């Protein structure tokens, strides 16, 4: 075989890595960049909370209960005299913990089950998917309330509740992806080469993952919202730990006299959920093969 | 003879993420009455885009940026792509048979509904007369039991039968020109033979012209009167069928002929591939686009721009190449020795 | 040097029926008889071409041999050992002996693996490399053997053209040094000028190896004839004729072979003018409900009433030319 021809060894097009293309497409949209900015801001706040917060979020200034915003307490104090801004800042940590770990639990469980169901098919698929259908039949908030009610409140139990509540969607999507992907010739090649099921599933997972990235991004926001919901209902994060949802709950009676108590955490929740959704949408568009080549 | 279709310096481009793709870059050709013309080239050479341009079926991000398409004395480019004038021409005077018969028919309507509608719209026939004509036409293209099958849906037909329906559809309004874009690539060889025989007899019967767009040299050798060879968005060679196959002149044409296995090849004969790949249509060189793959290039090819199509003296053969007659002889005989 | 008469593969009366199921309980209502009694042999170093139209079962034959499907019945003797019903764990050690090259160079390469990983993965599966360095060297050599620059190893499939991707598929097939490669339409998806490159590459690889055999599956008789030492023509799940390419072209005996040959145009108008054309009637019948007797009798120009009843068997009509037709003397 002659190797001399330069055309034969030349690649078809200049090299553009998938990741760089993705970043390029995403950054071309102002909204998406703003979304990423908001998320980055909250992440920094969560990391540097001890430095940013001027007060201990748990300390009760008994002399200044329900103070209006002032130089010392920029967002005022609540009904037991805690600094609202500091609680808001520390609440960011809880929100991110819940978001990240909740989605990790849901994703690992859901994608794992979906992969197994899709790959093996047949009765394995039937059993797993019927269970998932049963879970999907219950509204997630009811499911999570039931889990929280049984296990009780607290961060760990909230994570489990959220994980289970969001898991079915991951399982469904993964299973659908894998069912389609496993018909590809490259999977047949692996089979004929004698690859183990484990190896083949690894290949399937890598290929099925990108579309799920969109779900993961938007779900980070959803998980934060769910934690707030559970805490608002009183079955989430236990007081006095600062959680945005619990803060709204605490402030609800004083909505008209001291609206800042509910509006501040409510605004934070809205902002972060919106940001995650925008970035998720941006990702979806960037990953859409139909939009490839237009830009 | 006055040609029924004359395309002059057609240019069609696509805007993409990586740049401007000059899919068709200055193509001129003509089709005479009752002529079967083959347009041959590999994928991405612009052969299909040229035909879609003639039909004014280029959609965004594609755009026809220049040239003239003269059909019956009118320049089709003066009309709006979806305007009433084009609609009157498309399907009635020029019709097209596509590669994929499954996607060219609407799956939720019966064959009859789709074909009758064409007659009602274009020729203003009554439903009853139209139905009668459709049955005749289906019968003519060899669909058994046409009077009952007219009420079947596309999925009730096999691939070959569906393509027969497409041919019937293309012929309905007795068009002047039929464009068949790789009409049998998706079908089996024996079905392919059936369909080409059918198309040939049909255009003879209806006195239409036929353009066969294909990558298959055998098909044009069998059916075409005249041939255009396309490469990288341009026509590189034109001539009568016999002339092209007996005396191919462009090194690309010669290369193509040497690289395809033939049924009548001697045993143990080795194919001579064209090394390398077609050029990137985004970064087209100003010199001959085939130059990087050409083993016969001369100094002139490397310094001067790609020449226009020029007539080979004493023939009706046109070629876009600087080489002289002796060089072509050498180029062709090379094939015999390898 | 190849040993002339050593059989590498022998397929005996292979049948592969796919059930068509209906309803919740997956009741089997009918069978697609994709392969219905196929027998052939491949010698070491030989290329057998398997040609036929879509739905004739040629791809299924290939996939049965590599045991992507478990055959309904029949024997597949690989080096004299029947592998048709081996359980998967015993099958695994045989798998490095044969490889498959697919038609579609796009779907046959994992888009998220680098070119090097794709080509070298079988080596890892069968633990054929001792060290990372050994692996690297082996993959580099494979790249070179198919005419690809080893520096492209870290690139991803979408950065390659169709022809280059098919080269990667070939390199992967060669990785475990198999003795049989099944090529399933390896050039059909490629452009004309690239096809010849791949065909020549496959030929060179065979000549440069010790007794590599090919089963070359294609619908294109011109390519099969060019490439093979012997050609088997399939129609509706059965082989109707096996012979050398030369005899097949000069003296086809089965009416289906004749029609197939005449359907393929030769790129030469002078020859085309003199060729006789036999146009087959109708379409290929469904393999769910194939015609009785000789499957071709519904379309055959020389069929007689007996053809409806008798299933013709392959028989030698001299010089290894086998044909399954009762009208052939």
Image: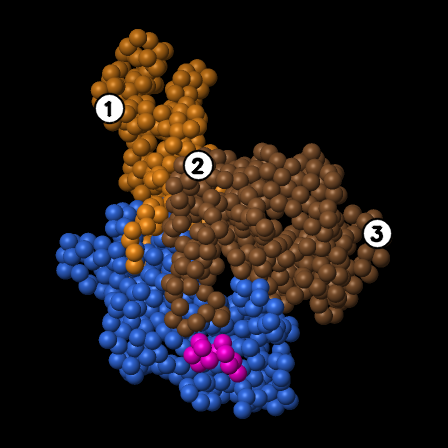
Chain colours: A orange, B brown, C blue
Residue appearing at x 32%, y 19% in the figure: A84
* Residue A48, disc: 1
Mark 2: secondary structure: loop
Q: Nearer the viewer, mark 3 or mark 1?
A: 3
Write down the residue under mark 3: B125
Q: Please tell me if label 2 and label 3 are on a single chain.
A: yes
Mark 1: secondary structure: loop
Q: Which chain's residue wears label 2?
A: B
Tell whether C317 sits left or right of B219: left
Point out the stretch of residues depicted in magenta: C243-253
Q: Is residue A77 above or below residue B164?
A: above
Q: Which chain's residue wears label 1?
A: A
Residue appearing at x 72%, y 52% in the figure: B33
Q: Which chain's residue wears label 3?
A: B
Quadrant where the C terminus of chain C is found in the figure: bottom right
**Percent coordinates x, y for residue C280 in the rendering:** 62, 74
**Percent coordinates x, y for residue A69 in the rendering:** 35, 11
How packed is label 2: few (under 14 Cα within 10 Å), some, or many (20 or more)? Answer: few
Tell whether B262 sits left or right of A92: right
Whole-number angstrom distance, CA of label 2 to CA of label 3: 58 Å
The residue closer to the viewer here, A250 or C242, is: C242
**Percent coordinates x, y for residue B225 in the rendering:** 63, 57
Residue appearing at x 55%, y 53% in the figure: B40
Write down the residue under mark 2: B304
How packed is label 1: few (under 14 Cα within 10 Å), some, or many (20 or more)? Answer: some
Q: Are marks 1 and 2 in contact (CB under 8 Å)?
A: no
**Sequence-earlier tag: 2 or 3:** 3
Residue C245, magenta (yes or no):
yes
Residue B122, magenta (yes or no):
no
Whole-number angstrom distance, CA of label 3 to CA of label 1: 79 Å
The residue closer to the viewer here, A230 or A175, is: A175
């Amino acid at each position: 075989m002659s190797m001399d021809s330069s055309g034969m060894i030349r690649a078809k097009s200049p090299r553009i890595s998938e990741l760089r293309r993705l970043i390029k497409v995403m950054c071309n949209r102002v909204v998406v960049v703003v979304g990423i900015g908001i998320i980055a801001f909250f992440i920094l706040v969560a990391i540097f909370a001890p430095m940013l917060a001027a007060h201990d979020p748990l300390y009760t200034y008994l002399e200044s209960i329900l103070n209006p915003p002032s130089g010392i307490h920029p967002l005022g104090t609540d009904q037991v005299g805690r600094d609202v801004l500091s609680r808001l800042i520390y609440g960011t940590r809880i929100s991110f913990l819940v978001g990240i770990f909740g989605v990790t639990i849901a994703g690992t469980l859901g994608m794992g089950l979906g992969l197994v169901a899709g790959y093996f098919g047949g009765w394995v698929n039937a059993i797993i998917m019927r269970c998932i259908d049963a879970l999907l039949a219950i509204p997630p908030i009811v499911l999570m309330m039931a889990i929280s009610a049984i296990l009780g409140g607290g961060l760990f139990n909230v994570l489990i509740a959220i994980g289970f509540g969001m898991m079915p969607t991951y399982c469904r999507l993964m299973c659908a992806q894998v069912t389609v992907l496993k018909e590809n010739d490259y999977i047949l090649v692996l089979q004929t080469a004698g690859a183990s099921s484990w190896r083949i599933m690894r290949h399937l997972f890598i290929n099925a993952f990108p579309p799920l990235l969109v779900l993961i991004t938007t779900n980070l926001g959803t998980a934060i919202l769910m934690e707030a919901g559970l805490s608002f209902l009183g079955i989430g994060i236990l007081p006095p730990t600062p959680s945005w949802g619990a803060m709204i709950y605490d402030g609800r009676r004083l909505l008209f006299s001291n609206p800042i108590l509910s509006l501040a955490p409510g605004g934070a929740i809205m902002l972060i959920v919106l940001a995650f959704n925008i970035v998720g949408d941006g990702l979806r568009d960037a990953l859409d093969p139909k939009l490839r080549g237009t830009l | 003879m006055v040609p029924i279709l004359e395309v002059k310096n057609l240019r069609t481009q696509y805007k993409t993420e990586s740049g401007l793709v000059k899919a068709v870059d200055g193509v001129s050709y003509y089709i005479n009455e009752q002529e079967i013309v083959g347009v041959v080239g590999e994928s991405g050479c612009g052969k299909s885009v040229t035909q879609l341009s003639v039909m004014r079926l280029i959609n965004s991000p594609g755009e026809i940026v220049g040239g003239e398409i003269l059909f019956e004395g009118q320049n089709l480019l003066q009309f709006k792509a979806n305007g009433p004038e084009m609609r009157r021409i498309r399907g009635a005077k020029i019709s097209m048979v596509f590669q994929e018969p499954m996607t060219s028919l609407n799956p939720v309507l019966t064959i009859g509904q789709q074909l009758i509608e064409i007659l009602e719209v274009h020729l203003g026939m009554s439903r009853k007369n139209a139905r009668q004509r459709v049955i005749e036409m289906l019968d003519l293209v060899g669909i058994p039991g046409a009077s009952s099958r007219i009420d079947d849906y596309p999925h009730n037909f096999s691939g070959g039968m569906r393509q027969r329906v497409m041919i019937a559809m293309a012929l309905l309004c007795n068009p002047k020109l039929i464009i068949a874009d790789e009409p049998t690539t998706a079908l089996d060889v024996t079905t392919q033979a059936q369909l080409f025989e059918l198309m040939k007899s049909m255009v003879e019967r209806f006195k239409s012209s036929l353009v066969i767009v294909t990558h298959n040299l055998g098909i044009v050798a069998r059916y075409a009167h005249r041939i255009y060879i396309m490469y990288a968005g341009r026509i590189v060679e034109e001539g009568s069928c016999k002339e092209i196959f007996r005396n191919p002149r462009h090194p690309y044409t010669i290369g193509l002929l040497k690289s395809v296995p033939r049924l009548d090849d001697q045993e143990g004969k080795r194919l001579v591939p064209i090394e390398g790949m077609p050029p990137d249509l985004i970064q087209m060189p100003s010199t001959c686009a085939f130059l990087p793959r050409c083993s016969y290039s001369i100094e002139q090819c490397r310094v001067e721009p790609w020449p226009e199509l020029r007539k080979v003296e004493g023939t009706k053969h046109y070629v876009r190449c600087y080489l002289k007659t002796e060089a072509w002889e050498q180029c062709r005989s090379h094939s015999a020795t390898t | 040097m190849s040993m002339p008469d050593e059989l590498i593969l022998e397929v005996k009366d292979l049948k592969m029926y796919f059930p068509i199921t209906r309803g919740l309980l997956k009741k089997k209502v009918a069978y697609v008889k994709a392969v219905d009694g196929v027998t052939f042999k491949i010698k070491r170093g030989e290329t057998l071409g398997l040609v036929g139209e879509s739905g004739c079962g040629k791809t299924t034959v290939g996939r049965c041999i590599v045991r992507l499907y478990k055959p309904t019945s029949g024997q597949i003797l690989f080096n004299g050992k029947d592998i048709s019903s081996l359980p998967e764990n015993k099958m695994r050690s045989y798998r490095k002996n044969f490889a498959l090259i697919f038609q579609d160079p796009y779907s046959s390469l994992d888009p998220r693996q680098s070119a090097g990983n794709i080509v070298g993965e079988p080596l890892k599966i069968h633990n054929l490399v001792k060290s990372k360095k050994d692996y690297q060297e082996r993959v580099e050599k494979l790249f070179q053997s198919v005419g690809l620059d080893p520096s492209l190893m870290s690139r991803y499939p979408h950065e390659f053209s169709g022809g280059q991707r098919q080269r990667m598929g070939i390199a992967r097939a060669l990785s475990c040094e198999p003795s049989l490669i099944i090529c399933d339409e390896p050039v059909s998806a490629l452009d004309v000028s690239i096809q010849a490159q791949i065909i020549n590459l496959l030929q060179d690889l065979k000549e440069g190896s010790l007794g590599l055999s090919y089963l070359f599956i294609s619908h294109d008789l011109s390519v099969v004839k060019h490439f093979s030492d012997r050609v088997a023509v399939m129609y509706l799940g059965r082989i109707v004729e096996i012979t050398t390419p030369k005899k097949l072209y000069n003296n086809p005996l089965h009416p289906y072979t004749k029609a197939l040959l005449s359907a393929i145009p030769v790129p030469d108008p002078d020859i085309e003018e003199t060729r006789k054309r036999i146009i087959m009637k109708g379409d290929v019948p469904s393999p769910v409900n194939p015609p009785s007797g000789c499957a071709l009798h519904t379309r055959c120009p020389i069929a007689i009433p007996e053809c409806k009843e008798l299933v013709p068997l392959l028989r030698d009509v001299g010089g290894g030319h086998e044909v399954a037709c009762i009208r052939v003397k």
